[in-house]
Amino acid sequence: MNIKKQWAFAELKDGRIFEGVRVGVQSKLQFEVSARANGWSLETTPIHASIFLAWHATREAGLHALEWSQFVAESIDAGITEKAPETPEIGQFTDPTQPDLYTELQSSSPSDPAFPPTTG
């Protein structure tokens, strides 16, 4: 079985960047519900659908609490891709006001209790 995975990305005006967030079934179903309620169509509005899925997936992952209209107003770019992220799954997140946690974790000492030594 070959599953076509989709990944969400978004860049907000405040400098936050979300990448590598898996678009799950909850986001896809919510798009369907919202599309019916608002007269949207995946076939006629693919960009709208892509941005909606990015909004919902990143919100569902807990990366922001923006409502749909706020997300649209605050986004520089957003969408979905089938290209897998180069970094570990779930939400590579960049916040310019905070240290880069991913880099900090990568550079942690092997003696760090959060990273117990592995046995060979």
Image: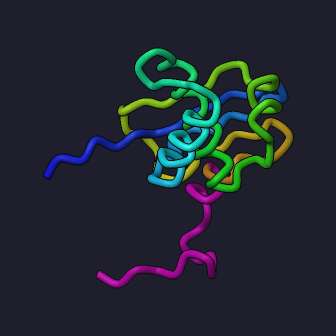
Q: Residue placed farthest to the left in the image?
A: 1
For residue 120, side relative to residue 115 (left or right)? left
Q: Bounds of the magenta span?
A: 103-120
Q: Is residue 118 magenta?
A: yes
Q: In the rendered image of this protein, does residue 63 appear above or below residue 34? A: below
The image position of residue 11, as x and y in percent, is 68, 27
Q: How many marks?
A: 0
Q: In the rendered image of this protein, does residue 101 appear above or below residue 34? A: below
The image position of residue 53, as x and y in percent, is 55, 37
For residue 86, side relative to residue 45 (left or right)? left
Q: Residue at x 56, y 47 (%)?
A: 30
**Residue 118 occupies which quadrant of the picture?**
bottom left
The image position of residue 21, as x and y in percent, is 53, 46
Q: Residue at x 56, y 56 (%)?
A: 106
Q: In the rendered image of this protein, does residue 36 appear above or below residue 13? A: below
The image position of residue 15, as x and y in percent, is 79, 29
**Residue 78 occupies which quadrant of the picture?**
top right
| Quadrant, the C terminus | bottom left
| In the foreground, 27 or 43 | 43
Q: Residue at x 61, y 51 (%)?
A: 102
For residue 26, side relative to residue 2 (left or right)? right
Give the overall secondary structure of the magenta segment: loop
Q: Is residue 51 magenta?
A: no
Q: Residue placed farthest to the top in the image?
A: 44
| In the foreground, 108 or 77 | 77
| In the foreground, 36 or 115 | 36
Q: Residue at x 62, y 55 (%)?
A: 61
**Residue 48 occupies which quadrant of the picture?**
top right
Identify the colour scheme used. rainbow
